Amino acid sequence: MRDSMLTSFSFVQIGEFSFIIASLGTSLGVLNPIIYPIIVASSVVTTFLTPYIMKAAGPCYTFLYNHVPASMRAKIDQREQQVAEAEAKAAEPSGDNSSLADNARHAVRHTFFLKHLVNLFIKNMSAHDEEKPVS
């Protein structure tokens, strides 16, 4: 749960992509031009505050953990124990080299499959664009 809280706190930042969306919305007339500086300012503020917000994730987790009911704490502890056991099991060497090779083969096949799927999609989209009549 601590990792989940840290991850969620890291998503606070609005990011640079909001500039693109805001400028597109302004240029299309969908967004009031007075809102663009507000979006830019909030993006700059959240960019600079993100490290501090992420640092606050630990104390916030501790605060919430100490203030939830005991039944919820028991569930959190049980889940964290399950995760720790799974991570320990995954870190143990299995001694089965064929499974590592099989996993590598599967990853390569999966990558090539995705590559061909994306290429097919791109070809289909470009063929579709060529068929459109120009008005």
Image: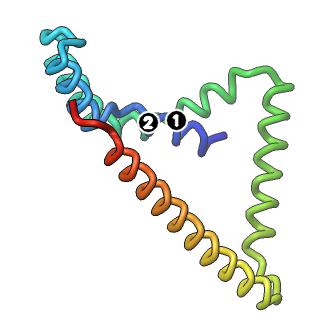
The residue that appears at 67% across and 82% down in the rendered structure is 105
Task: Please state which amino acid type lies under the numbered disc 1.
Answer: Ser
Task: Please state which amino acid type lies under the numbered disc 2.
Answer: Phe
Which residue in the protein does label 2 denote?
11
Q: Is residue 4 left or right of residue 53?
A: right
Q: Is residue 133 left or right of residue 79?
A: left
Q: Nearer the viewer, residue 58 or 111?
A: 111
When asked about the image quadrant of residue 93, the answer is bottom right
Quadrant (top left/top right/bottom left/bottom right) for the C terminus:
top left
Secondary structure at badge 1 equals helix
Q: Nearer the viewer, residue 106 or 130?
A: 130
Residue 106 vertical placement versus 81 (above, below)? below
Circle 1 packing at 10 Å, graded few (<14), some (14-19), many (20+), is few
Quadrant (top left/top right/bottom left/bottom right) for the N terminus:
top right
The span from disc 2 to disc 1 (Cα, nearest Å) is 5 Å
Q: Nearer the viewer, residue 22 or 48?
A: 22
Q: Badges 2 and 1: C-beta atoms under 8 Å apart?
A: yes
What's the mark number on residue 98? none
In the image, residue 131 lies at what x, y percent? 35, 44
Circle 2 packing at 10 Å, graded few (<14), some (14-19), many (20+), is few
In the image, residue 83 lies at what x, y percent? 76, 53
The residue that appears at 69% across and 76% down in the rendered structure is 106
In the image, residue 73 lies at what x, y percent? 79, 31
In the image, residue 108 lies at what x, y percent? 60, 78
The number of callouts visible is 2
Secondary structure at badge 2 equals loop
Which residue in the protein does label 1 denote?
8
When asked about the image quadrant of residue 94, the answer is bottom right
When asked about the image quadrant of residue 24, the answer is top left
The residue that appears at 53% across and 34% down in the rendered structure is 59
Q: Is residue 127 left or right of residue 24?
A: right
The residue that appears at 83% across and 34% down in the rendered structure is 75
